Structure formats: C-alpha cells, structure tokens
Image (cartoon, rainbow, N blue to C red):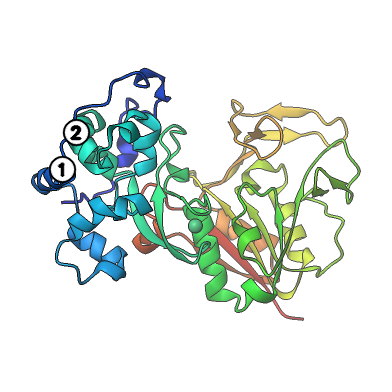
C-alpha cells in the first residue's frame, strides 16, 4: 500500500539527501539470481504497484503480467514501478547496482529497503498535474532546505506549489495568456513563467547600476519606482518579493501602474498570524542606512547573498492591498489542491489584482 498521508513535513532531520557514492563505490556486486527468480521474489516483496503501472503506461494495460514487463523492459525505459521509487536516487547512491545485473527494484527490496525506510521515502513523492509543464508530473520534496513551503517541486520545471498555483490562476482568469500575454516578472527564482507566458521579460534590482539599462541579461528596475511607461504589460509578477521591499505600498502601486487597463498583477508571500503588519527594517532614503527593528532574517535570493526580510505581514494585509490599489479588484487565493501537489504545510498565498479597464 502507498501511504497517502502527507506526514513528511514533520520528518526528523536525520533524513538526509542522497549521499555521494564514495561510501559504496568499492562494494563488490552482490550475488544476483536470474531474472525469473528476481520476478518471483519481487512478487513477495509487494513493492510493485500493478494498478499504478497499468494506469501510467496505457500501452501495457492489457498485459496479463505487468511485473514481468517492468523487469524485462520497463525499467530500461526508466518507467516507474510505483509512485515513489526513484531510480535516479538509487543509481546515484549505489553505482554497484548497474554492475550487478539486477533489476533496480529487486536490488532495492533485497538489499536497501531497510536502509532507506520505504514508507518514509514514499511520503516524499506525489504525482499530480503540473500546470507549468502541462502534464502529469512527479513532485519531490526537498528536505535539505528544511523549508516546507518549498516542498514538492516538480521534476519537470522545478516549480514549487506557488508556481503551479500562479499558472493555474492565470489559466483561470487570463484567457489566452500562454499565447498572447506579455508577462514581466521581477526577480524570478524559476523559469516557470518564462516557460509558459506568450512573451516574457524580467528585471532585477542592482542598486549600483543605472535604472532601465540591461545588467547581466536583466533589466535593472527598482520595483518601488520603475522606469516603464504606464500600461506596458498584460501581466506583472513578483513571486516572493514583496516581503523584501521597504515600501510594499509603492511596489503594489507601481505594478498596477505598469499593467494595461484590464491587466493583471500577481504576487505571492506568506502572511503571518500578527493582527497588524509590522516592518522588520527601515531604510533611510537619504543616507541609504538600514535600521533593524527586529533581528535580521535573510531569504534565498536569485542575485546577491540573500534578501533581507523587511516586513512581517499580518491579518490586515488584504485590507492594505485594497487601499494601495483602489483601482483594482483583489483575489486572494490560498487553498490545498492535492491534484496540483499543493498540500497542507506547503500552501502558498497568491494575490491577483485585476486592474479596471479604462
Ligand atoms: Zn512542472
């Protein structure tokens, strides 16, 4: 049985990412029985999920014995024997596997399953539909980051749950955006919007360079005071950016200004439980000096050494956005969607602003 309960968010830290192969590189190949014996032993191990295999690979749906097909053909085509078995993980960690001439799943069941804690591994994987890739994909949790919000990244596009939610919501609200919309993204961390938008451009902020010019392939823009003309884009996006600017009100106003009438602004963040939002740090615009009101916290940043967390947004965040963007309608989406691999513990908050048509 595959355990469907998403318990992995509370896994202890002893679960480690794959080891480098050096520990086992010199291990002799284990003695391996012929394939028919491996097939019979695999039946007893109950690692092969026949229903899953038939469902995934319709070309073999009518075969009487999918397990035999998997051992003889499927594993060579990197087919999955169940929803969690990761052949790349096993190969990376056990280079002796390929020398041994054994089926990877049999080898796992015979020699590795107790080391690897099958049940725990199974909880790190989910199949679902990725709206960025546009197909069914495997989502894999990253434990080395210890960051539940970034869990369940798509193996196709590396998108996190928030990226899938953004693509899903744009599909829902902005018809034809994949063919026609010009999407401009500030500080992209993934290629998800680049992969999907009709046309795409992006910017980063380099404080020491001239605004509006291209630096390292990005347009240099300060989100709080952009150099674009009013109504330049169909969609403007900023994923996990707003909690790192000093003036989120200016950022929201600027993003709404830069989209066309009837256009869309989309951003994401994680509001906390505070009743009222509070700044964590303040910038003296004249001197450029930063005053920390709370101990500094840094998040990963696509450029530079880390982005300072400047705000803790609270329960008043939605009301504030409405005040900052009076000419736009706010849609705040935050929901579990098992189908998209968006599950409790990793649920993003997506804010869409629909600018009124002129
Ligand atoms: Zn994907």
Residue at the far bottom in the pictured view: 358
Camera sees residue 38: yes
Q: Is residue 8 left or right of residue 142?
A: left
Horizontal and vertical percent for residue 156? 49, 54
Mark 1 or mark 2: which comes first in sequence?
A: 2
Judging by the rendered image, the residue that carries numbered circle 2 is 32
Quadrant in which residue 173 is drawn: bottom right
Q: Position of residue 255 (x, y in %)?
A: 73, 60
Q: Is residue 306 above or below residue 331?
A: above
Q: Residues within 10 Å of mark 2 (few under 14, many from 20)?
A: some
Q: Position of residue 2 (x, y in %)?
A: 20, 51
In which quadrant is the C terminus drawn?
Answer: bottom right
Q: Residues within 10 Å of mark 1 (few under 14, many from 20)?
A: some
Residue 327 position (above or below residue 74): below
Q: Nearer the viewer, residue 36 or 249?
A: 36
- Percent across and percent down for residue 162 are 51, 54
Label count reads 2
Residue 154 relative to residue 302: left or right: left
Residue at (72% x, 28% y) in the render: 291
Residue at the spot 59% in from the left edge and 30% down from the top edge = 297
Judge from the rendering whether residue 342 lies leftward or rightward of residue 164; answer left or right: left
Contact? badges 1 and 2 (CB < 8 Å):
yes
Task: Name the residue nearer the viewer: 282 or 34.
Answer: 34
Q: Secondary structure at mark 2?
A: loop
Which residue does the image show at 24% across and 65% down from the upper left?
Answer: 54
As helix, strand or loop, the secondary structure at mark 1 comes to helix
Q: Which residue is mark 1?
A: 38
Please tell me which residue lies in front, 77 or 295: 77
In this rendering, the answer to whether 219 lies above or below 356 is above
């Amino acid at each position: 049985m595959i355990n469907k309960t998403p318990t992995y968010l509370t896994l202890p830290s002893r679960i480690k990412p794959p080891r480098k192969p050096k520990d086992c590189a010199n291990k002799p190949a284990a003695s391996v029985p012929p394939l028919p014996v491996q097939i019979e032993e695999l039946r007893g191990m109950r690692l092969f999920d026949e229903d899953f295999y038939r469902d995934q690979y319709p070309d073999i749906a009518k075969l009487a014995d999918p397990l035999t097909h998997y051992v003889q053909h499927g594993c060579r085509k990197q087919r999955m024997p169940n929803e969690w078995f990761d052949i790349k993980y096993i190969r990376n960690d056990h280079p002796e596997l390929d020398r041994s001439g054994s089926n990877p799943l049999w080898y796992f069941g015979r020699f590795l399953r107790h080391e690897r804690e099958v049940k725990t591994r199974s909880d790190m994987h989910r199949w679902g539909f990725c709206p960025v890739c546009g197909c069914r994909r495997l989502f894999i949790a990253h434990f080395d980051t210890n960051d539940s919000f970034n869990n369940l990244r798509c193996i196709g596009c590396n998108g996190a749950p928030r990226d899938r939610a953004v693509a899903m919501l744009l599909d829902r609200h902005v018809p034809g955006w994949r063919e026609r919309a010009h999407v401009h993204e500030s500080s992209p961390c993934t290629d998800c919007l680049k992969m999907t938008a009709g046309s795409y451009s992006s910017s980063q902020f380099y404080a020491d360079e001239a605004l509006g010019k291209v630096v390292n392939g990005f347009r240099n823009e300060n989100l709080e005071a952009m150099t674009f003309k009013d109504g330049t884009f169909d969609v403007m996006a900023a994923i996990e950016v707003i909690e790192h600017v000093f003036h989120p009100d200016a950022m929201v106003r600027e993003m709404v200004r830069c989209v066309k009438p009837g256009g869309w602004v989309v951003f994401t963040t994680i509001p906390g439980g505070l009743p009222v939002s509070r700044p964590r740090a303040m910038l003296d615009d004249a001197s450029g000096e930063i005053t920390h009101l709370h101990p500094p916290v840094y998040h990963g940043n696509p450029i530079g050494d880390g982005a300072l967390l400047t705000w803790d947004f609270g329960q008043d965040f939605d009301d504030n956005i409405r005040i900052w963007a009076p000419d736009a309608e706010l849609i705040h989406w935050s929901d579990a969607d098992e189908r998209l691999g968006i599950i409790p513990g990793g649920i993003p908050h997506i804010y869409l602003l629909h600018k009124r048509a002129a």
